[in-house]
Each structure stands twice: as C-alpha cells, then as structure tokens.
Image: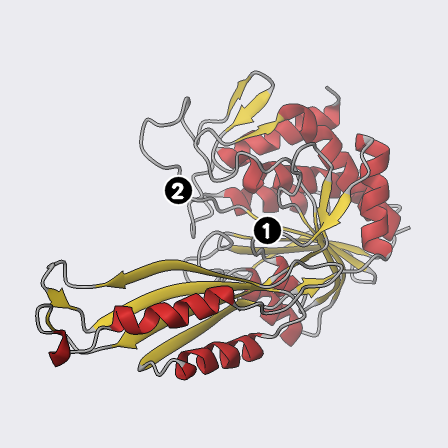
C-alpha cells in the first residue's frame, strides 16, 4: 500500500470512530476542516439547528469543482449484532468494518485526501470546494439543501460536483450515477363510517371502498421512461385501518405511498392523475403530498467523461451510467451545479450489520477523484 492508501485508510478509520448518527456529526466535520485548513482551504461552518454543515473552498476563480458528501450515518442496529463495535473501525479479511465505512466515510476520506494532494501541488487552475453535511440520512432539510440555498443567495455557483456516494454494484468502478429519479410521497386517508360489523348497512367500509381505487393505481402505467430513466414506479409502503377489534367496521383507512418518477412525468401531473382516479371511484378522502426531490440528469460532457476516463485508467473498468436507486443530496446540488455525478465504493453492505468497505479500493478511489479534479482544472 502506498502513502495515498495509508493516508486514506487512516482518515477513514478516524471518521468511522466519530459517532455521527444523524443529525450529529460526532466531530467528523472539525476533523475534516482541520485537515483542509492546513492546505489552504477557507473553511466555513454553515450549521443549522442540530445539523452540522461544512463549506470549504480553496481559490476564488473559476471553474469550481466541488466534492460533496455526508458524514452522518444511520443507527447501527441491535446492540451486539455486529461482529465488532460499529464505531471502532476494524480491519478483517481485507475489509474495513464500521458504520459508515461504505456510506460514506470511505468516500469522504478519499475525497479529502485527493483534494489535499491537488491543493499541495498548486498547479490546478480554478477552485476546489468540499461540502459535507450531517443531515443526508435524516430529514435532509437543514443540510445540503440549506447550504445550497445559502450559496445561491450569495451568488456562488458550482461548475462540476462529484458526490462520493457508494455507487459500485458488482465490482469497484462499475457504475457512475449521472442522475436520479424524482421522489414524491403521498399520505391518503379514505373516510368511511364506523359501525358494528354485523350491521354493515349502518356504516360505510373505507377498506371496501378503497380496494378498487388502489388496484387502479397499481395498474396504471404512469409513463414509459426514456433512454436514461426507468418508467415511473408507484409503490404503497403502508396500509392501516381498524381499531384492533374484529367486530368493528373502521371509520378510516390510511395509505402511504411513493412515486419514483422519471422526467417524463412531473410531480404536479402525478398528483392530478392520482386524485382523478380516487374521484372516479367516488372515494371520500384527504391526501397530503410531499415532494422529496425532482429528477435530474447530467449528460455526457466534461465531468462524466473525466470521471469515466479516470475510472478506466485507475481501476481498469468501463463504468456504466445509471439513474437507478434512491435519492441523494445530488437532487439539491443539481439546483446549483451545472453538472452533478456520483461515484464511490461498493454499496452491497450499506445500512447493514457489519457494514464494510474493501481496503484495497480506498487508494484507487482517492486516485480517481484526484484525476477527475485535475482533468477539470487543467
């Protein structure tokens, strides 16, 4: 292992040791800020409420390349379920174990060490920035979204943004996320009339009313997607009705559902169509909508091409472009940055017991980030 690998591994361990369960950063942001300050970055804390946010920039001219990510992690799960303490980084069988090892402290460590090398070299034109938050795994309101709003208010722009999310699927380097689907949540309440189950004529069963409408929603083709995006998907995540008693027709039925939607649909159009279907079935209902994020796409261009070339050169893999998977903070950064992509280590163990990252992948990951930065700032 070279100095790059040792340095990145050591930083990844230090970050994992920070108990940064959302929205806490556990000292991780101070750790990164201290390192970046030492190589000439101007570090600014843009905290909001309990959420920690770091905006670090070196240089004042364009173009600006931003490395972005999060230091917060999901809870580790049941006590004693892990083979080793989730906040005590442990090397075993060529893997580094710990909560956040893959999602995404390994990626953060690789981004920071890459930025440090470019900064020390001093030959790159333009500017480099690092944006980190402790609110990606939580509500994602006071983190990257808030920082983006602040930067927009100040008139700052980003030319290229690279997130270190774990995108690799089967083999390190095999996937670049160059976009994400939109996400729209709905909470539906269907109103009936509670009564004794032996006298259904005295009430109105919201379950019976809702079933045909729900079947219609499930059977609807919302769009056909396009060359870059899968067709829009409708999925119900929770249905609840009843008091717990077997002899009562309930008064209400609650349904939680989600759309993961392509650019071929809009959130507004989906809402209208859902409410049309519900009304066609003569339901009495209330519905609440929450837009998590709109879809975004970065087509082939300077950032995608530079990153793909770096992956090919360092890892010997030709990465595919993908917009699948869940949401990320890329949905906020796409409102500020001209180009946004995501690339990082294998994601097989994320959010699982015994989360881990391959130690051998940390050095090439940092090298890929460095090559990408240099290609954009030559």
Name the quadrant containing residue 189.
Answer: bottom left
Earlier residue among tags 2 and 1: 2
Q: Is mark 2 in CB contact (under 8 Å) with mark 1?
A: no
Name which residue lies at 57% across and 42% down. Answer: 104
Q: Which mark is residue 75?
A: 2
Residue that numbered label 1 is attached to: 325
**Circle 1: element type:** loop
- Name the mark nearer the viewer: 2 or 1: 1
Name which residue lies at 36% across and 72% down. Answer: 188
Can the viewer see residue 121 in this picture?
Answer: no
Residue at mark 2 to residue at mark 1: CA–CA distance: 21 Å
Name which residue lies at 83% across and 61% down. Answer: 63
**Circle 2: element type:** loop
* Residue 372, percent from left and from top: 81, 45
Relative to 83, residue 118 above or below:
below
The residue carrying pointer 2 sits among few (fewer than 14), some (14 to 19) or many (20 or more) residues within 10 Å by Cα, namely: some
Front residue (pair 24, 104): 104
């Amino acid at each position: 292992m070279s100095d790059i690998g040792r340095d990145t591994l050591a930083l990844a361990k230090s970050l994992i040791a920070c108990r940064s369960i959302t929205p806490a950063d556990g000292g991780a942001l101070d750790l990164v800020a201290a390192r970046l300050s030492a190589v000439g970055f101007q570090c600014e804390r843009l905290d909001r409420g309990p959420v920690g946010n770091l905006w670090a920039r070196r240089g004042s001219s364009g173009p600006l390349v931003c490395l972005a990510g999060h230091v917060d992690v999901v809870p580790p799960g049941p006590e004693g379920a892990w083979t080793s303490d989730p906040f005590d980084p442990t090397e075993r069988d060529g893997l580094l174990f710990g909560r956040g090892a893959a999602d995404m402290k390994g990626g953060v460590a690789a981004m920071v060490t890459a930025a440090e090398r470019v900064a020390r070299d001093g030959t790159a034109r333009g500017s480099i920035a690092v944006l980190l938050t402790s609110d990606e795994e939580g509500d994602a309101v006071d983190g990257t979204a808030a920082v983006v709003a602040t930067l927009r208010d100040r008139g700052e722009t980003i030319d290229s943004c690279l997130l270190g999310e774990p995108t690799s699927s089967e083999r390190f380097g095999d996937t670049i996320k160059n976009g994400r689907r939109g996400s729209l949540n709905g909470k539906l309440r269907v109103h009936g009339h509670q009564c004794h189950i032996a006298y259904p004529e005295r009430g109105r069963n919201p379950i019976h009313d809702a079933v045909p409408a729900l079947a219609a929603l499930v059977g609807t083709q919302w769009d056909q997607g396009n060359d870059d995006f899968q067709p829009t998907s409708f999925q119900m995540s929770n249905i609840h009705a009843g008091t717990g008693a077997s002899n009562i027709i309930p008064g209400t039925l609650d349904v939680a559902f989600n759309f993961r939607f392509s650019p071929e649909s809009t959130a507004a159009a989906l809402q209208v169509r859902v409410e049309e279907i519900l009304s066609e079935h003569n339901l009495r209902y209330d519905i609440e909508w929450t837009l998590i994020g709109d879809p975004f796409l970065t087509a082939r261009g300077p950032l995608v091409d530079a990153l793909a070339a770096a992956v090919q050169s360092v890892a010997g893999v030709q990465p595919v472009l993908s917009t699948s998977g869940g949401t990320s903070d890329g949905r906020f950064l796409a409102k500020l940055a001209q180009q946004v992509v995501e690339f990082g280590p294998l994601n097989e163990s994320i959010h699982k017991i015994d989360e881990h990252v391959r130690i051998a992948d940390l050095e090439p990951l940092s090298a890929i980030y460095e090559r990408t930065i240099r290609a954009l700032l030559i």
